[in-house]
Image (spheres, helix red, strand yellow):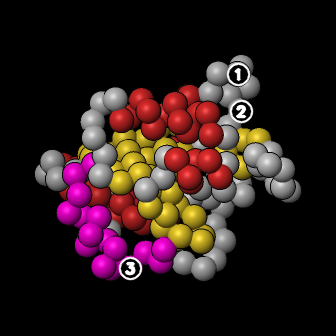
Amino acid sequence: MQIDIITVLPEMIEGALNCSILKRAQEKGLVQFGLHNLRDYTLDKHRRVDDYPFGGEAGMVLQIEPIDRCISHLKSQRDYDEVIFTTPDGEQFTQKTANELSLLKNLIILCGHYKGVDYRVREHLITREISIGDFVLTGGELAAAMIADA
C-alpha cells in the first residue's frame, strides 16, 4: 500500500510515521509513505498556500492551485483508489472505515488546515472526507497520522 500525505507541516507527522506499528509495517514492505509539503507546489517566492475563500467569506483556506498541482503530480505516477480530505465535517472515522481503507492499494490524504480548503478542491479533487471526531485540532496532520495508523 502507498499512502501519500499532502500537508503544510510534514515535520508534524514525520515522527509518527517512523515509529511503532507504522515503522514495522514499512520495514516489512506492507506500506510506503510519501510526505509532500504543499509549499513545494506553489509558484510565488513566499510559498504561500492560503488565501481568502473563493466567493468571499471570513478566514483563510488552502488554495486550489498548489493542491491541484500536487495531486496531479502524484496521479501522474500511479492510480489512486481514494483522495481523502481530513476535515471536522467529514464522515466519522470508525473501525469499519479503517478496514475498508486497509484493502486499498494507493491513497492520498490531504490534511486540512486553516478554515479548510477552497470549496473547488472538495468539489473536483476529493473522493472522500473523513473526520476523526468532533473536536478542533491544530490541523489535519494528526488525523492523517491516525488514519494511516489504522
Compared across the picture, whether 144 is left or right of 59 comes to left
Q: Tell me if mark 2 has few (under 14), some (14-19) or many (20+) residues whose alpha carbon lies within 10 angstroms of its own.
A: some
Amino acid type indicated by mark 2: Arg
Image coordinates of residue 1 in percent, x first then y, are 22, 51
Position of the C terminus, as image quadrant, is: bottom left
Q: Which residue is mark 2?
A: 48
Q: Which residue is mark 3?
A: 94
Compared across the picture, whether 140 is left or right of 97 comes to right
Q: Tell me if mark 3 has few (under 14), some (14-19) or many (20+) residues whose alpha carbon lies within 10 angstroms of its own.
A: some
Amino acid type indicated by mark 1: Asp
Which of the two discs, 3 and 1, labels the residue nearer the N terminus? 1
Asked if the residue under mark 1 is in contact with the one under mark 2, i.e. CB atoms within 8 Å, the reply is yes
Numbered tag placed on residue 35 in the rendering: none
Position of 99 relative to 79 (above/below): below
Position of 142 relative to 7 (above/below): below
Amino acid type indicated by mark 3: Thr
Does residue 104 appear in this view? yes
Q: Nearer the viewer, residue 45 or 17?
A: 45
Image coordinates of residue 90 in percent, x first then y, are 53, 70
Q: In the rendered structure, which segment of residues is drawn in magenta?
A: 91-106
Identify the residue at the far left of this view: 28
Per the model, the C-alpha gap separating discs 2 and 1 is: 7 Å
| Residue at the image position 27 percent from the left and 36 percent from the top | 78
Per the model, the C-alpha gap separating discs 3 and 1 is: 39 Å
Q: Which residue is mark 1?
A: 44
Quarter-of-image position of residue 25: bottom left
Secondary structure of residue under mark 3: loop
| Residue at the image position 57 percent from the left and 64 percent from the top | 87
Is residue 45 part of the magenta span, yes or no?
Answer: no
